[in-house]
Amino acid sequence: MSAVVTADSAAVTNTGSPGTRRRDRARLLLVAALVIAFVGLPFVADPFATSTATRILAFALLAVSLDLLVGVTGLPSLGHAAYFGVGAYTAGWVSINVTAEAPIPLLAGLLMGAIAAGATGWLAVRSAGIFFLMLTLAIGEVLHQVAHSWQSVTGGSDGMYGIPTVNVAGTALANPGLLYWYVLVAFGAGYLLIRTVVRSSFGTALRGIHGNEPRMRALGYPVFRYKLAAFVLAGAVAGLAGGLLTAQQRLVTPEDMGFTTGALVLLAVVIGGAGTLWGACLGAALVVLVRDYFGPALDGHGPLLLGIVFVLVVYLMPRGIAGLRRKEPHS
Amino acid sequence: MITANLTSILNGLSIGFLLFILAVGLTLVFGMMDVLNLAHGSIYLVGAYLGWSIMSDGASLATFAAALGVAAIAGLAIGGALSLLTKPLARRPHLDQALLTLGLALIIAETLSITFGNDVRAVSAPAVLSGSVQIADGYYPMYRLFLIAVGVTLAVAVYVLVERTRAGALIRATVADRDMVAAIGIDNRRIKIAVFAAGTMLATTAGVLGAPLYGARPGLDWTILILALVVVVIGGLGSVKGALVGALIIGQIETLGRALFADFASFVLFGALALVLVLRPRGLFGAATGARV
């Protein structure tokens, strides 16, 4: 576990020396180019590609929130899709029954994601490692069952449908391009939130817990409260990501929070490289592309290809795509 | 009223023993090698589909026995392959091995769905065992009684093997402190592969045994995996006794919960899990030392 060290933390510690100033400028240019590429995408892409990109953004935000647990705090969760689903259902319910005016459904999803994570996380974060993996799997499955059973609210296995389009200042975002920008803005906000937390002293403490929990406890850190806070924050951002999913597909089914989704998002984080937020986004993009874009060509058996990729990544690239940037082993 | 309760208890027992057959492999493999086999549910499903395809022409005792035999051989082969596949990762964090089995589980699930389609496949019990027997003043399906009998037999066999034989002593020693076993010069590599293979063999066999109850369908693998994991967590990782007690408890909770709360039975399951973990974080029979996490 302690072997996972991120390029981000290395970049932070390196600032100041003259050689890195040029690298910082290159970084800034890269970020600017990326932002322009993301914002400009609907002008060049066809509507299907644009809506795939929208789905990628929602899933990438989920992956980023999971990375806060897996890569930063060292808590491998298999049930993270549950909070994604809670956020998606909440955003859908609010859109139908209260208002579809942005950003209220998203904030409701965020809030309920946090509440659900708090209500279940106190149990999960008492454990660590493999136990944590199993507990989150069980919690996720329970919440998934609730989505199936609570028909009056969730619509059961038919899913929640008839969710109205998001309104921004009274205008419905029916156009895929406009919707993409809406999701992009929310994704940016969620990403920056997690990034800020990871780089704060709180984030450093979380990395410390990842590296050596007994030492952090001995130093007097309230480890349980830190882990729970990370879990709730991750759940909140996952709920926000769920709200984005609802905004995009306007239909929520229990499968959106099922085991497969939870496994795929963990896969995305691992493929991308746990501990680096941009790596998680790359991994999420790969997963959604294989599942939704190339999946139909494989007769809907995209997960087969993903499983094979996953196995190869575990053997050959234990640090994921992000790990390719750093050659020398670091501990 | 008495018969209703008796039926519920017997149902719980039959599910409990099925879960024990599943969980014992999971718990021992983790205890000995730190490998959390997330493909265990998929391996169960392989057994269930094997049972369906062999018994689809009509379930007689002969086809049932054939299905059990084929499933056992398939399970041994899968277990051997899995132990070879996880070996290169032995020095990596435990999570990597769990992730590997997760990837394999996805591959197995998709392969099964390509081969057998996405329909729910029902399997009937072999003709000899498909009737009902009179118990007290009600009737009870004979197949479930058969399942209880098989479960008791297997539980006794596993107990004798683990607690009363030389190989069993080696298994227990490896669970307790594998480095010490290696340090005193005992080669436990072969027993590790054997336990892995035996565990997956029990999983595929459980798939055939459970097929008349649960059938075979996509998604069943995760349901089964989660039940087995809950059993193992409640019982304590690495403990055979824990797996037995945990499985019997979960069997009763599952049946009672479904009877009393129908749709919200999973809450009862989760409640039991939460209660055990709050009171005993390492499970009912989890060792304070030993299996490290």
Image: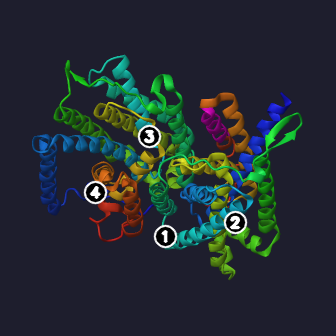
Crowding around mark 2 (Cα neighbors within 10 Å: few <14, some 14 to 19, many 20+) is: many
Q: Is residue B173 left or right of residue A243?
A: right
Q: Are marks 3 and 4 on the same chain?
A: yes
Residue A170 drawn at (x, y percent) = 20, 18
Magenta stretch?
B264-275
Q: Could you give the CA–CA distance between mark 1 and mark 2, rounded to whole angstroms? A: 21 Å
Mark 4 belongs to which subunit?
Answer: A
Mark 1 belongs to which subunit?
Answer: B
**Circle 4 residue:** A13
**Circle 3 residue:** A255
Tell us which disc is closer to us: 1 or 2. 1
Q: Is residue A63 magenta?
A: no
Residue B253 drawn at (x, y percent) = 70, 38
Q: Could you give the CA–CA distance between mark 2 and mark 3, rounded to whole angstroms? A: 40 Å
Q: Secondary structure at mark 3?
A: helix
Q: Secondary structure at mark 1?
A: helix
Tell us which disc is closer to us: 3 or 1. 3
Tell us which disc is closer to us: 1 or 4. 1
Q: Dots 2 and 3: beta carbons under 8 Å?
A: no
Above or below B28: residue B87: below
Mark found first going from the N terminus, 1 or 2? 1
Q: Secondary structure at mark 2?
A: helix
Q: Residue at x 81, y 33 (%)?
A: B5
